[in-house]
Amino acid sequence: MTRLIASRNGFGGLVTVVALFLVFSTAAMAQVEHPSQISVQAIGAFTKDSISDNSPLSHQSTRSGGFLVGYSYQFNQWIGAEGNYGYTRNTQNYFGSFGQSSLQADVHELTGSFVLHIPVNVAKVRPYALAGAGALIFDPTDKFIVNGMDRQTKAAFVYGGGVNFDITPKFGVRAEYRGLVYKIPDFGLNGLNIDKVTHFAQPSLGFFYRF
């Protein structure tokens, strides 16, 4: 008798767990009213200073600003994906036994990310976190300053998060922070190869449109 009661209780618990799972899954997979979103943001660009472990060479980038445009699609309440293009221009400074070498470059950013949307009980506030990968393309503005210098692409890991503030059901303000981790460029010049990974901080503020 005791075993029968235990069996029934176990079966009832299993049914409850399955029911809760189905309810949660249905809610999570519910279609989003406006799944597509286009965003345009002004960004700040701040790169961490680096020192080589194997030589007296060090690297520093000037602080700058630029823009970031993106398209995202929200599959359900929790999950989405996003693609972005960003642009800024800064000066890459290298210090070593040769003195200082400064190379101005356009920096093009191409990234794709998975987006985790975080439901909160606050009207018109939609926080999210993101992680993904992409590339940073460093294009010298004057390729004739140093013989052999050329455009260089570096793979990058991107992470971050932010908040969408809905002004209307389709339009609002986005505040975001993105961090990119990549290997410092040397533009194909062995004398500038610092062989270090650095961090590119990218706070931003802009607008979005949902449809």
Image: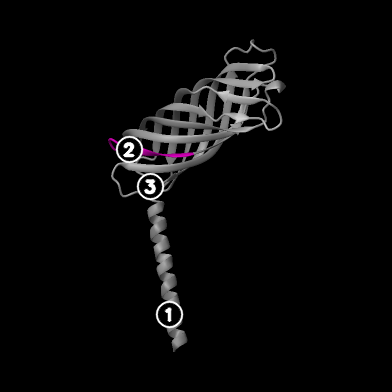
Position of residue 6 relative to residue 94, above or below, is below
Closest to the observer, 2 or 202: 202
Question: Residue at 45% across / 85% down in the picture?
Answer: 4
Closest to the observer, 80 or 174: 174
Which residue is under mark 2?
A: 165
Position of residue 7 relative to residue 126, above or below, is below
Which residue is under mark 1?
A: 8
Q: Which stretch appears magenta?
A: 160-170
| Distance between the alpha carbons at the discs numbered 2 and 1 | 49 Å
Closest to the observer, 35 or 135: 135
Principal secondary structure, stretch drawn in magenta: strand
Residue type (three-letter) at the residue carrying disc 3: Gln
Q: Badge 3, how many Cα within 10 Å: few under 14, some, many 20+?
A: few
Marks 2 and 3: CB-CB under 8 Å? Answer: no
Inspect the magenta stretch and tell me whether residue 166 lies in it.
yes
Q: Badge 1, how many Cα within 10 Å: few under 14, some, many 20+?
A: few
Identify the residue at the far bottom of this view.
1
Asked which quadrant contains residue 52, the reply is: top right
Q: SS of the residue at dot 1?
A: helix
Q: SS of the residue at dot 2?
A: strand
Position of residue 119 relative to residue 195, above or below, is below
Question: Residue at 59% across / 20% down in the picture?
Answer: 93
Mark 2 or 1, which is nearer the eye?
A: 2
- Residue 156 x/y as whole percent: 58, 34
Residue type (three-letter) at the residue carrying disc 2: Phe
Residue type (three-letter) at the residue carrying disc 1: Arg
Q: Badge 2, how many Cα within 10 Å: few under 14, some, many 20+?
A: some
Left or right: where 171 falls relative to 8: left
- Residue 136 x/y as whole percent: 57, 28
Which residue is under mark 3?
A: 31
Inspect the magenta stretch and tell me whether residue 148 lies in it.
no
